Amino acid sequence: MSQSQMEHYKILPQIYDWCSNIDRIKDGKPVSEGFTYTSDNNREWMSIEKLRKWIEENKSKVGNI
């Protein structure tokens, strides 16, 4: 799946069966068996300039940065 097709990961905890709850999953798709996402295997990085722009555009959504 390309980056343009995927905007973000939705991580649902197993508590209260949220990971099986259709209302919470909505149009989410499961990742393949054994999938891991960690910083050390990430192939896509924002430039410092792009990150600063994103923070400026979104700081009202994420609180004080």
Image (spheres, helix red, strand yellow):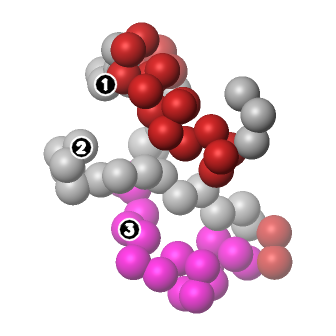
Q: Name the residue under label 3.
A: 29
Where does residue 49 sit, x and y in percent of width and height? Answer: 38, 14
Q: As drawn, which residue projects farthest toward the right?
A: 16
Q: Residue 5, located in which quarter of the rendered image?
A: bottom left
Neighbor class of circle 1 (other Cα within 10 Å; few <14, some 14-19, many 20+) is few
Question: Which-is-in-front pick, marks 2 and 3?
Answer: 2
Q: Name the residue under label 2.
A: 3
Neighbor class of circle 2 (other Cα within 10 Å; few <14, some 14-19, many 20+) is few
Q: Earlier in the sequence, mark 2 or mark 3?
A: 2
Mark 1: amino acid: Glu
Q: Mark 1 points at which residue?
A: 44
For image coordinates 42% across by 70% down, the residue present is 28
Part of the protein shown in magenta: 17-33
Magenta residue check for 49: no
Q: Residue 64, located in which quarter of the rendered image?
A: top right
Asked whether, in this view, residue 31 is left or right of residue 19, the answer is left
Task: Measure how far apart labels 2 and 1 are at the Cα level.
Answer: 9 Å
Task: Measure how far apart labels 1 and 3 are at the Cα level.
Answer: 20 Å
